[in-house]
Amino acid sequence: MKPDDSSLHSFELAAVERQALNLLNRASALDVFPTPVEDILAAAKLRVAPKGMFDTAAFLAFVNKKTAQAAQSLKSALSKVFGLYDANEQIIHIDDSVVPSKQTFLKLHEVGHHELPTHRKIFSLFQDCERTLAPTVADQFEREANNFARFALFQGDGYRRMAADMAMGIKTPMALAKKFGASQYASAREFARTNHRQCVVLILEPIEFVPDGQTYANVRRIEASPSFAQQFGIPTIERIDVSHALGGLLPVGRKMTKPTLLVYSDRNGDRHECLGEAFDTKHNVLLLVYPIKALTGSPIALPVQFSAK
């Protein structure tokens, strides 16, 4: 799976969210849908470069302003990232080849670097010298900026409150993605991590079809609601193929998998009837699993098709 991109200590998260809420208020962005990213950028006094750093001509022009070491570091970094914050120019560069919903998150991520005081100071200091951020510091900054973007995009607890009043099912994060202007990937993660009901979302890489072999999909990320994690734990699954207990959920040859019965064992080994659904976004496959009691509030006896642990 992808490395952790968002975990912070509670006091660190609270500090990041305070800054994000302050900006949302300055931009009058709360309860405006989809989340008004351009208003947020304006409130932060940041500009998006009309031609991103990822354009060859723009990159060469930028490099000419930097030291050789800084230019080389930047060139290497650009092969791995889709957004860049220029602290001195107060401008951000976004790779416009990615889908618009991902550009939205990238913009808010770079705004986070600008709005978090330590980030702005450090990025300004390191940008024009031959030093680079220590990997542990860089990783911390990225996780803080990710949480800033998440909080801003989903308007604090606005997403959580809306999801709480909607049906448990894969169509809910899909609908909320459109409402907030988020990607379905980001919306599915937010749906699981903030839901008061028990559920888990497995985000898979695109399904692989191996000639004369098993169809499978690698697991990219797993997000569980707090109550699900407490009772069932967080799954440790690296790959799902058609023979896996969750393999029947893979939407092979179709866009979606309708609610499908399965049995899921909790930490004590007790078995629970659950439903699983899936949706293929073309970029990822989203699997949602939840106990039937999260849907109905009471157990229902239904025939079992799959069993997972």
Image (cartoon, helix red, strand yellow):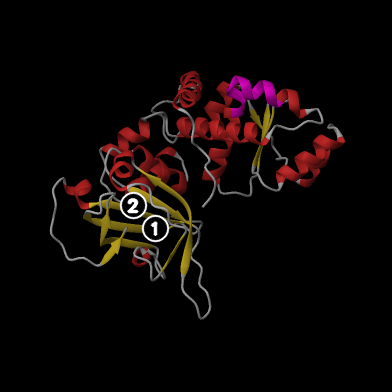
In the image, taking residue 176 as reference, residue 137 lies left or right, namely right
**Label 1 to label 2: alpha-carbon separation:** 7 Å
Circle 1 Cα neighbour tier, 10 Å, few/some/many (<14 / 14–19 / ≥20): many
Residue in the image at 49% along x and 31% along y: 8
Q: Secondary structure at mark 1?
A: strand
Residue 63 in the image: x percent, y percent? 82, 37
Q: Position of residue 49 (x, y in %)?
A: 69, 35
**Considering depth in this image, is 231 or 48 the residue closer to the camera?**
231
Q: Which mark is residue 228?
A: none
Residue 298: x and y in percent read 13, 48
Pointers 1 and 2 in contact (C-beta within 8 Å) = yes
Q: Is residue 158 visible?
A: yes
Please name the amino acid that badge 1 sits on: Phe
The residue at which mark 2 appears reads as: 170
Image position, residue 241 (x, y; %): 43, 68
The stretch in magenta equals: 113-123
The answer to whether residue 119 is left or right of residue 188 is right
